[in-house]
Image (tube, rainbow, N blue to C red):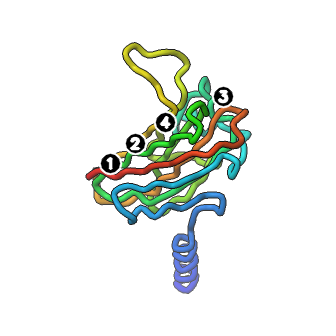
Amino acid sequence: MKRILLTLTALISCIIINAQWPSNVTVIDADSGDSIVVKGDLSKGAKMDDLSWAWNAANACFPATQSSKFKGNHVFFALTMPTQCEMKISVTPTDPNADLSIYAYRLSAAEYYLVPELGSCITCEADHRWDGNWKNKVQTSERKVSMQNPGKDHYNILIGVSGPAAATSGAFTLKVKFEK
């Protein structure tokens, strides 16, 4: 019995150590400074047929009423969030008339769940084009979300960039800024 438990423990350890993001996720090195800039294009992604993970109560990323803003190709980026910081994430299309959306969710440092196979996350934030005008506010083509980590634990962050159904290509710049 002891040998079985040791073997099982070793197997689980190997799975955890070798866990990583799928190949369609671009991993960003968060140790490269206070600010990171990455170029991307929706043509490198794919459409996602099932968006119900987003309005699932365990994720609460965006409501089903906004799903049309996320029916285009999805491109994924991931990084490990440093401790005791705020992370500000933005995406800006190269074409200022392009319509992009962004979402980001936080997982424990040992989890690598990719949507739509996301059962739950610690937190999820999204930004997309508004349906109407807001008094005294102007929306640009830049979309922004932020994550806070006041503690001493590291977290995995998955960032998704998408757009409406017609958005299957389009270059963009993704910026991640860390503030202590």
Which numbered disc flags the more N-terminal residue, 3 or 2? 3
Q: Position of residue 74 (x, y in %)?
A: 65, 45
The mark found on residue 68 in the picture is 3
Q: Percent position (x, y) of residue 94?
A: 57, 42
Which residue is the site of mark 2? 146
Please state which of the two labelled residues, at mark 2 or mark 4, is closer to the viewer: 4
Q: Are marks 4 and 1 in contact (CB under 8 Å)?
A: no
Q: Residue at x 38, y 60 (%)?
A: 154
Question: Counting other residues with Cα less than 10 Å from the Cα at mark 2, is it few (<14), some (14-19), or many (20 or more)?
Answer: some
Pointer 4 or 3: first along the chain: 3
Where 130 falls versus 52 (above or below)? Answer: above
Q: CA distance from mark 4 to mark 3?
A: 16 Å
Residue in the picture at 37% in, 16% down: 136
Q: Position of residue 91 (x, y in %)?
A: 50, 42
CA separation in Å, label 1 and label 3: 29 Å
Of 52 and 81, which appears nearest the observer?
Answer: 81
